Amino acid sequence: MQGSLPPEAQEKLEELQDLQETAQKVAAQKQQAETSLNESKTALDALGDVDEDSVMYREVGELLVETDYDEAEEDLQDKVDTLEIRVEQLEKQESRVQEQFEDLQQELQEMLQGGGAGGPGAGGPGGPMGPGGAGGA
């Protein structure tokens, strides 16, 4: 079917596919950042149960290096703060990509229905093609 599409429609379809790939990459990055954030928050919470005088170690590459409570807490808090910002940025990026995808999908749909006469109520299939992720967060 793609071979019978006008060149402009084929181009829009390729852009949609590119946006879908971008959305999947952003969703994967966001998932990874959220996982790291949850792990860091869990570690920070666990640190609250540790006596401040306890000997602690942190992993540096393949080594365990002794650290003190304040340094460990500061490092974890910095990591949590950084990851929260990263997750927020990825959520915004995910929303932008979803919006671009929907706009492009609408343009393509109008193009295929006869040059834009369909209007905003044109509806129709194509929702499942979406990049997903933005509505499920």
Image (spheres, helix red, strand yellow):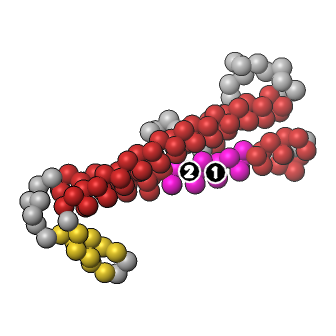
Instruction: Please state which amino acid type lies under the numbered disc 1.
Output: Thr
Q: Is residue 126 visible?
A: no
Horizontal side of residue 78 vs 101, given as left or right: left
Q: Which residue is mark 2?
A: 26
Task: Pinpoint residue 49: horizontal percent, then vertical percent.
Answer: 11, 55
Magenta stretch: dominant secondary structure: helix
Secondary structure of the residue carrying numbered label 2: helix
The magenta region covers 16-29
- Circles 2 and 1: CB distance less than 8 Å? yes
Name the residue type under label 2.
Val
Out of 104 and 26, give the one closest to the viewer: 26
Q: Give me the disc on residue 22.
A: 1
Q: Nearer the viewer, residue 68 or 127?
A: 68
Tell me what residue is drawn at x 80 percent, y 28 percent.
110
Is 12 situated left or right of 88 in this image?
right
Measured in 3D between alpha carbons, the distance from the residue under mark 2 to the one under mark 1, in whole angstroms, is 6 Å
